[in-house]
Image (cartoon, rainbow, N blue to C red):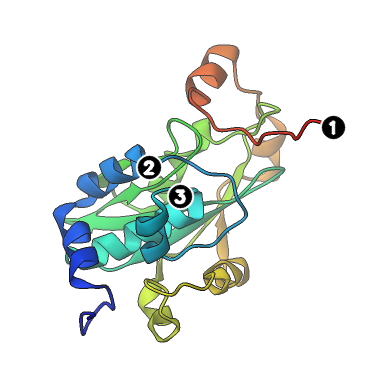
Amino acid sequence: MVTDDLGFTPAELRKLRRLKDPYGIQCFLNDLPYHLADTAWSPRRVLHENTAHCFEGAIFAAAALRANGYPPLIVDFEAEHDTDHVIAVYRVKGHWGAIAKSNYTACRYREPVYRSLRELAMSYFDTYFNLRRQRTMRTFSRPVNLKRFDDQRWMTTEKPIWFIIYYLLEIHHYRLLSRAMIKRLHHVDERTFKAETLGKAYKKIASE
């Protein structure tokens, strides 16, 4: 048996609604192990597998937001010499906040205190860096309402949802930095690097 609106079973929907609000959703994501597999699981698969990476965490958060009365919105950050980061976003009294799953300490939750999406995006800039300690964030997208993918059952399909990733690659992104700013950027210091990579998951290299 599935619900008429979201496609989840009653048990799945109860799990999502027990999270109650954006912070509850973030706490749930924080408790999930971070995995590094090249997957694109739907929120249903995340519930069943009990693990997620950045993209899957954002998509799960968007579905959980929807189950609790918010629009299912995500924003994509593009980076140079680094991977993109996807966040779920929400608004409270006109101010933006975010929910995210990340392998880095501070690229996760944001309280709804940001007056614009650019302001919200810039809050991630200083701690968005690669293992060479280069600050890599460059652009952010407009919010994408995932309702546009309802006919592809993005919340409950057992198939990979690469179609959302492909869409994010196509849409317009807004630049955060000028070329002159990029040239003046410094590498992340040792203390910040250690703090942000605390508990970071690394890919295991198979022994020969």
Q: Residue furthest top?
A: 191
Alpha carbon distance from label 2 to label 1: 31 Å
Q: Residue furthest right?
A: 208
Depicted 47 relative to depicted 208: above or below: below
Q: The C terminus lies in which quarter of the figure? A: top right
Residue 20 shows up from this direction: no
User: What amino acid type should be assigned to the residue bearing mark 1?
Assistant: Glu
Per the image, the residue denoted by label 1 is 208
Q: The N terminus lies in which quarter of the figure? A: bottom left
| Quarter where residue 42 is shown | bottom left
| Quarter where residue 93 is shown | bottom left
- Residue 163 x %, y %: 56, 74
For the point 54% across and 36% down, the residue is 128
In the image, 194 versus 144, the foreground residue is 194
Q: Is residue 58 left or right of residue 138?
A: left
For the point 57% across and 68% down, the residue is 172
Q: How many marks?
A: 3
Give the class, few, some or many, for how many residues have Cα within 10 Å of label 1's Cα (few <14, many ≥20): few
For the point 57% across and 66% down, the residue is 165
| In this view, the mark in front (2 or 1) | 1
Q: Earlier in the sequence, mark 3 or mark 1?
A: 3
Give the class, few, some or many, for how many residues have Cα within 10 Å of label 2's Cα (few <14, many ≥20): some
Mark number displayed over residue 32: 2
Q: Earlier in the sequence, mark 2 or mark 1?
A: 2
- Residue 176 x %, y %: 55, 48
> Pointer 3 and pointer 1: residues touching (CB < 8 Å)?
no
Q: Residue furthest front?
A: 208
In the image, 183 versus 121, the foreground residue is 121
Per the image, the residue denoted by label 3 is 52
User: What amino acid type should be assigned to the residue bearing mark 2?
Assistant: Leu
For the point 35% across and 57% down, the residue is 47
